[in-house]
Amino acid sequence: MIRDVLKMGDPRLLRVARPVTDFGSPQLRALIDDLFDTMAARDGAGIAAPQIGIDLRVVIFGIASHPNYPDADAVPQTVLINPVIEALSPHEEEGWEGCLSVPGMRGWVPRFSHIRYRGYDANGQSIDRTASDFHARVVQHECDHLDGILYPRRIRDLTRFGFTEVLFPGRTLSDD
């Protein structure tokens, strides 16, 4: 089912989400299905449960390609529950980000360029991966939602934050 996405300003987006304890449950499977439906309907690269008002540490992400990021490598379709992220290098890369909860806007956001992320899938099976570049950016962006952080809080130079149609005139970009 396609769910409404909360927008920046909604206090529910600022909460720290609760850990999942009920792996494999019908409720968790329904949540994951709704997240995938909602992400697909809005042409997103990822989405977190808090963005649809569910206070659980669940994110999904994955794209084969995305028109907003034509040079980005594919990101495997992933359900990641109770994630932990570790920077594998202090090196950061800056890049444009958008968000389904911040529609119509883009910001230039620094992110660690090489990370390790761990967590669980829907059945409670362990996930342990390393990621670089765009894949690492997507994971960090989505996991920030679980701690009540929207990408504008990460922007260091607010002159590089604005409305998509002003920053990129003539281009049609989704909110991803």
Image (tube, helix red, strand yellow):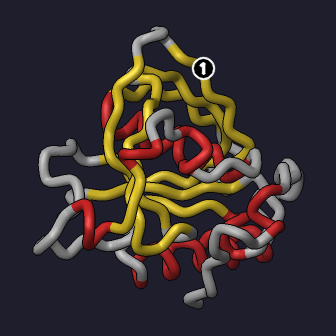
The residue at the far front in this view is 159
Q: Is residue 69 left or right of residue 78?
A: left
Q: Is residue 46 left or right of residue 3?
A: left
In this rendering, is residue 86 above or below 166? Answer: above
Q: Nearer the viewer, residue 137 or 122?
A: 137
Q: Secondary structure at mark 1?
A: strand
The three-letter amino acid code for the residue at tag 1 is Glu
| Image quarter of residue 167 | bottom left
The residue that disc 1 covers is 86
**Rendering coords of residue 127 (x, y %):** 58, 35
Which corner quadrant holds the C terminus?
bottom left
Question: How many other residues sit within 10 Å of disc 1, few (<14), some (14-19) or many (≥20)?
Answer: few
Residue at (85%, 48%) from the top-left corner? 19
Which corner quadrant holds the N terminus?
bottom right
In this rendering, is residue 25 above or below 122? Answer: below
**Rendering coords of residue 173 (x, y %):** 25, 71
Q: Is residue 142 left or right of residue 146?
A: left
Residue at (53%, 46%) from the top-left corner? 141
**Rendering coords of residue 118 (x, y %):** 62, 30
Camera sees residue 120? yes
Q: Nearer the viewer, residue 109 or 145?
A: 109
